[in-house]
Amino acid sequence: MRFLNNREFPVARAEVAEFAAGAYDLEDEEVREIFEYAIERGVLAEEDGQLMKG
C-alpha cells in the first residue's frame, strides 16, 4: 500500500494491480485480497474500476 502514497488519485485498479504484482512478486489473487481488505477498512474506495483514497 505504501507505493500508493505518492500517486495521484483516482488510479486504474488494473494498472496498479499489475504494477504491485510485478514489483512485489505477488500473485494476482494476493493483490486482489490486499485491495479488498483496504476497501473494507476504508483506506481505499473503488468506483468503476478506479481506486480512490477512502
Image: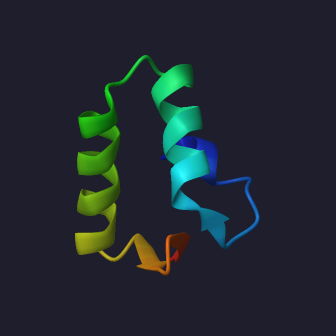
Residue 4, percent from left and from top: 61, 52
Q: Is residue 23 above or below residue 29?
A: above
Query: Is 32 left, or right, of 50 in this rendering?
Result: left
* Residue at 43 percent of width and 78 percent of height: 45
Q: Is residue 53 left or right of residue 38?
A: right
Looking at the image, residue 7 lies above or below residue 3: below
Query: How many numbered badges does the structure rendering display?
Result: 0
Residue, x 31% and y 26% (percent of image)?
27
**Residue 53: % across, % down:** 54, 75
Tell which of 18 and 1 is nearer to you.
18
Q: Position of residue 39 (x, y in %)?
A: 32, 70
The residue drawn where x is 24% and y is 59% is 37
Give me the residue at 69% from left, 71% from top: 9
48 to 27, vertically: above or below: below
Q: In this view, does 20 lie to the left or right of 39?
A: right
Is 5 on the left-hand or right-hand side of 35? right
Residue pushed farthest top? 25
Color style of the picture: rainbow
Q: Is residue 35 above or below residue 10?
A: above
Picture quadrant of residue 2? top right
Percent of width and height locating residue 33: 23, 48
